Image (spheres, rainbow, N blue to C red):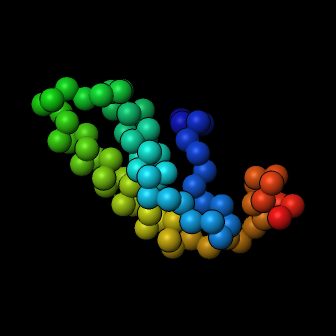
Amino acid sequence: MCRSIKTLRVLDVPAEPDEVRAAALQYVRKVSGYRRPAPANELAFNAAVDEIADASRRLLDAVTATHPARHPAMRSA
């Protein structure tokens, strides 16, 4: 669906909070079809971004790497 969303889990390099929020914002924009919501929808839009960012952070904190990184630069490191 969103092929341009950046992979945030790269071995032992934690994603920055602003990266997680940016990915959540991009996801909500894609799902909702809004680049910027109307004032009447802004509260729901921002709440969705916050919830997805929180869920993404929990996921990133919980998963462990079980295979080599896909990123070529990380394989050679």
Q: Is residue 26 left or right of residue 7?
A: left
Indicate whether 29 appears above or below 55.
above
Q: Residue at x 42, y 32 (%)?
A: 30
11 with respect to 42 (left or right): right
Q: Residue furthest left?
A: 40
Q: Is residue 77 visible?
A: yes
Total marks in image: 0
Residue 5 at x, y = what percent?
Answer: 55, 41
Q: Quadrant of residue 56?
A: bottom left
In the rendered image, the quadrant that contains the C terminus is: bottom right
Q: Residue at x 35, y 27 (%)?
A: 35
Query: Quick check: can you spot residue 56?
Result: no
- Taking the spot 19% from the left edge, 26% from the top edge, the residue there is 38
Residue 50, position as x, y percentages in the image: 30, 53
Identify the image quadrant of residue 40. Answer: top left
Residue furthest toward the right? 76
Residue 2, located in which quarter of the rendered image? top right
Task: Judge left or right: residue 5 versus residue 39.
Answer: right
| Residue 53 locus on image (x, y percent) | 38, 55
Name the residue at 76% across, 52% down: 71
